[in-house]
Image: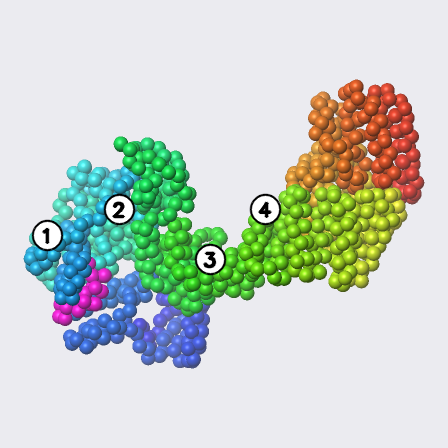
Amino acid sequence: MNRRTETARDRLLEIFWPDAEPDRARDSLKTALWSIRRCLKTAGVEADEFLQVSKSTLRWAADTVVDAMQFTELAAGDNGSSTRAALDLFRGDFLEGDYDNWAVAERERLAALYERVLSRVVRTSKDTDAAQLLIARNPYDEEAYVALVEAELQAGRRSAAVTWIERCRKALSEIGETPSESFEERFRSIIRVEPVVADALALPFAGRESELGLVAGKIVDASTGHGSMTLVHGEAGIGKSTLLNRVIHIARENRLRVLQVRCTNDAPGPFGPWQAVFQGVDDADFDTFVRAHGGDVATSVSRAIAAALHDPAIIVVDDVHELTGDALEIFVSLARSASVTHAVIAGSRPEGVAVLRSRLHDLEPEEIALGRLDRKNLKWALSQALGNEQPEVLDVLYGRSGGHPLFFTGLLNALVNEGALRREGRTWQLIKQIDAELELPDNIRRFIDARLQARGDAPRAVACALALEPAANADDLASVLRFDESTTLDALDDLLSLGLITQPVVGPQFAFAHDLIREVAASGLNAGRRALLHRAFAQRLAASGELEASLRLARHFQAAGDLLSASQAYCKSAHAALELNAAQDAIERCDAGIAAAEKLERTPPRDLALAKLYRTSAQAAMSLGNPGEAIKRAREAVTAARAAGDIHESSAAMLDLSVIEGAAFHISEQESDAAEAARTATVSGDAALEALALVQRASAARRLGHREEALADCRSAHDLAQRCERPDIIAAALEEFVRAHMTWWSFSEAMESARSGLDAARRSGPSAEAALRIARAGLWYLLERLDEAQAEIRTAMLAMDEAAVRQRGPLGSPIHSLPVIRFVGCFMAAKIESERKRWDAVAKQLEGATALTNVAKLPRFAEALSLLEIDVMLRRHMSGDDESAHARVAALSESSFPQDTIGWSDCPELAKARDAARGRRDDAEELVRTALNVLEGNAHQAPLESDRAFARLAAAAEEIGAAAVATRAQERSRYYRSRRRAAAGTAWGAETRS
């Protein structure tokens, strides 16, 4: 509009980014210029021919047609053709949504000119289209109603004519006026329409005491001649008008004059409600007054109104956001002049607040932002409306409405209309159960829908899309709706200005102001259009490759009817949840994917998707410490993988089952499942998977006491891993080598595996290094090198911290998850401190292990913790220790787990014998004999630290005088300790580099 004129860059910064930091404003201008140049190039023109840019100025050089200027020229014409051309050219308000001063002024000028053109057409040609357009902007224009009523009567549509008559009467009644005598005389014979029945229930005024008190203070000030300007604003239906009506009531009680003005979007003429207000306070003819003061109508009208208020008064102007053009100018001028001695109170919805702040900033108006009502206030209001308290009704209504007064009242009356609430005497009673997801009544739905449509189709379409994908940003919305950038951003600005959406400080870029708005927006599309949008969102999210978006991706695929893609995305999202250690979320996502896949016909891709979902959910169940559920799901994975005919997936599923069986200490099942996994991996040619299966079979063989089988499987796994060049599997095989060798006291081989294993683990990553170091700590413990064992554990803990940062969440299998490694590390540290009798340090380490609840509740891990706690209490022998130990012993079950580096050589039979001996119970001697037999068998199968176990039993037998048992236990303790020391050789207690 300022073409061929040089404009300073600084001037543009002042107009468009007045509140931004200088550097930020300059960056914004640079971005805007880049966007303009890009648009020009896209249109196939040379940008420099249109936009000339220097370091200090900008100039639009092209001879460009501007529709706003064309419209002004055509509207000034006095012939029918130019008038029609002007109407055809007008497509909406100038730069709607832009509230910079220059844009607002131009928009209001053009809007007023448009209304004058419409009025001219109606009066000269009785055009019904022009009449309807005029009423939409100025609902007080009687001539427009006359044109429409006459047209309907001529067409024989009597009921439609009645509707226009009633609409005219209602519009004028809002400003205290009635149709002219000629209007009533002409249409007196038309039958009136009965008024709409009001709601059965209404809430009393509640929850606005502080706001009311603030405004009441303004009333008191006005009564003494001290004026003020107050702006009350909030989202539609929040209770602005209710508060203002209360204010008016208080003012009248205080004998103040009240000037009440209600603004509407269909007010007649360019002056809105002010013509009626003027005529109500001044005897002069308004049209004559306007002609006499044509130079500055707004100031003259406002001063005339203010001058007529001789006594202290309050001026209450509701819905100021509806004012535009001259009508807005009159309000601003009136606020300036009247607020000196009178209380001026304006009510506005969100879309008007920015303009009012800008126009009234020098008055520094007091702002009252109305929020939603809290539960306490609504509880009181509801009890007053119903005549008693109804907690169930309050819960449902508050949950659905979020404290929004209009929504709360609408839902309340919906219960009455549905027959859920019935009047009984002076109270209302709930006579049937109500659903927490109470259906939204039609009147509230229409109210919200009207707000969504207030600025046209584009904002409503954007709202509908945002309801389907709440995390969408502007680019996402533009892409799925196939809108250009400008249309999308304008639509978002409209929704923001209407208060329908917000821009949260954290989280998604946009959010709905209320869940019910999102609900209505989501239902604003037909099923086909909704499915298309879901598919478009799914395609966009899939292209992004973001793991965090996988759950949204799954839901969009499901809503679009692509159940196979949905199930695959649910599996991916479950993996994302596991990375964040959100195992329960992972299970729920897997279950959603399973439910989606099971709706499909059986095909290999469907069964393969099910197998992956069951595998992932099994891992999640194990992470939650639920081995029974994990095993069940892992078996389902095997079944689905076999049904899919995918031998690789079958091997992987069987391997997972073996790992989970091992974690649950179902050792025989672990061994057979691992053997099956190894066989199928061999058939499929997957050497890496075969190596992992052999590691699991070696672990099972070690626990079952099968030394040669365990070592053979470790060697085979190690060789395969080396051929595959997989340092992670090499480290796992060598870790198992360390455990196997130290179980049977092959210490030199164990130390060699510990050295080479650490190299492989470091190449693999911090998780593998942590697991290997914990195994090494066990080796140093058996070699009586406790300082080295402790150092190993400390380094392992640091590696786990690094792994948690780098990898997030568990490793590939439940038995080697970070929580399991950390638990074993804490447990091992507690055993070391126990040998040194540092009881406080023992308690600290046990507390760390117990805090890992999902690991600590696994049966074998829980038993190991209890046995170590019992051992510590019986050896510490402080006050209360014996009683606490006895309570823990009573909770132990019979020994069912083999000896392992979890629990070591301790067992329930030993704990029970020691407890009975300490308590001098009658069955103590029998229990120590039983324990001796169990320890003999355990030591033969897995020596480990059996010398310590025999020493503990010998001490217990001595306490009760069981000499034979004590002697035998002492002999076995000395024998195994001498063997262990001999097997260690020079490594016993000596410093060795790692």
Magenta: main secondary structure equals: helix
Q: Earlier in the sequence, mark 1 or mark 2?
A: 2
Q: Are marks 4 and 1 in contact (CB under 8 Å)?
A: no
For label 4, the SS is: helix
Q: Earlier in the sequence, mark 3 or mark 4?
A: 3
Q: Are marks 2 and 4 in contact (CB under 8 Å)?
A: no
Provide the residue designation for mark 1: 282
Residue 51, position in %: x, y? Answer: 39, 76
The N terminus sits in image quarter: bottom left
Frontmost of labels 3 and 1 is 3
For label 3, the SS is: loop
Give the Cα separation between the discs numbered 4 and 1. Answer: 73 Å
In the image, which disc is placed on residue 469? 3
Q: Which residues are magenta?
A: 123-140
Q: Is residue 225 visible?
A: yes
Q: Report crowding for label 4: few under 14, some 14 to 19, many 20 or more residues within 10 A (C-alpha).
A: some
For label 1, the SS is: loop
Q: Is residue 816 visible?
A: no
Amino acid type, residue under disc 3 in the picture = Glu
Amino acid type, residue under disc 1 in the picture = Asp
In the image, which disc is placed on residue 241? 2
Residue 45, position in %: x, y? Answer: 42, 80
Amino acid type, residue under disc 2 in the picture = Ser
Give the Cα separation between the discs numbered 2 and 3. Answer: 34 Å
Residue at 70% of width from left, 26% of height from top?
Answer: 887
Q: Earlier in the sequence, mark 4 or mark 1?
A: 1
Q: Are marks 3 and 1 in contact (CB under 8 Å)?
A: no
Residue 286, position in %: x, y? Answer: 11, 58
Q: Are marks 1 and 2 in contact (CB under 8 Å)?
A: no
Q: Report crowding for label 1: few under 14, some 14 to 19, many 20 or more residues within 10 A (C-alpha).
A: some
In the image, which disc is placed on residue 584? 4
Q: Earlier in the sequence, mark 2 or mark 4?
A: 2
